[in-house]
Image (cartoon, grey):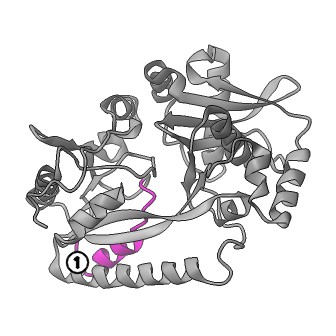
Amino acid sequence: MTAETKLLPTPRPTLFTDEAFLAALETNDCAGVAQGWLPRHLQTADGRVPCYEKSHSWGEFVFDFEIARAYRQYGLNYYPKLVACVPFTPVPGARLLGADDRARLALASMLRERAADGGCSSAHLLFVDPAERDLLTSQDWIARAQSRYVWHARGATDFDGFLARLSSKKRKNIRAERRKLGAFAIEWRAASTLNDDEWLRVFRLYGSTYAMRGQEPYLTLACLRQWATHYGERFWFCLARLDERIAAMAFFFEDGDTLYGRHWGAEADFDGLHFELCYYQGIERCLQRGLQHFDAGVQGQHKLARGFEHESAWSLHWFAHPGFHEAISQAYAQERAALERQISGPAAGELGASSAD
């Protein structure tokens, strides 16, 4: 089958690669030059690629700090690098937004050429869909896999129906976690309906999650409010009130048949509230609205105990230095094999909690 053959349908641009979504990040001090995200989007008559020239590796969720360290040890510069991705958003989807395979291959070639001509060490496409992975691995791009966890409706129409397919132990644990939270009043609100005081409160809660790690939040209040204006009832907050005040929140996007959980924050460490707002409320939301999938973010093997299923998240990489390209190709092949062994091992599905997203 040749590159001229149209193998894939025209990719449906997701909400996250929508130009308005990216513009809110770029014009509201989230992903701009000052933050180390220089917009370098590719645009041709046949398609586009959202991409950035990066001076660091933060906010990508495909971690390559060891590669940067290895470059330094050999006296080479790893930064800048060229990255096709959605900033701070580990959501799989098409990155080569071309009309057919010929256009997508041309865009990928342009991405490498731009990296080389611009003095970048490498080019990367993060959280690609499997079709892009298959198309580009034949063109000397290196595929890397990591774990993600997704909930699927699989015919369930209510929460009890979802629980029925789990083991007795998991059902018991989930019900026990939810019973502890009777003091909280939980509501869903379209982001566009929040008033000024509520916006200040939810942003303070969002920022508190980063403050605990000594970081500034990736997103700004202005960015969130611009998304709320543009996306209407596709951008939602789940609020937990205690004595009428907003004590915790999580926010989500709806796109197609999928709910995407993004960030959360709470004023205190309430036992079990993270699982309720970030997982169980999202599952109930999908069941109520007929959504078929719930992507609650990468990482977190504890999701397996709460009805989520393991999937692979894919990224593609090209390194201008031939020696590094070959060495990293071998390393990522070993990494993929280890991941497959972990997934298929006897303990898969019953693994303990890992760090939060």
Which quadrant is the N terminus positioned in?
Answer: bottom left
Residue pictured at 40% horizontal, 35% vertical = 15
Placement of the C terminus among the 4 image quadrants: bottom right
Can you tell which quarter of the image residue 62 is in? bottom left
Tag 1: amino acid: His
Q: Residue placed at 36% from the left, 82% from the top? A: 333
Q: Position of residue 295 (x, y in %)?
A: 55, 49
Residue 135 locus on image (x, y percent):
22, 63
Residue 41 seen in the current view: no
Near mark 1 (Cα within 10 A), the count class, few <14, some 14-19 or many ≥20, is some
Which residue appears at 25% of the width and 59% of the height? 81
User: Which percent across, then down, holds residue 153?
Assistant: 62, 49
Q: Is residue 142 above or below residue 216?
A: below
Check disc 1 and report the residue beneath it: 325
Q: Quadrant of residue 18?
A: top left
| Total number of numbered discs in the rendering | 1
Q: Is residue 29 left or right of residue 125?
A: right
Residue 163's place in the image compared with 225, above or below, is below
Is residue 243 covered in magenta? no
Q: Which residues are magenta?
A: 60-77
Going by the image, does 117 lie left or right of 71? left
Q: Quick one: SS at disc 1?
A: helix
Q: Splitting the image into 4 quarters, where does residue 67 fall?
A: bottom left
Viewer-side residue, 72 vs 353? 353
Task: Decide if residue 231 is in sight here.
Answer: yes
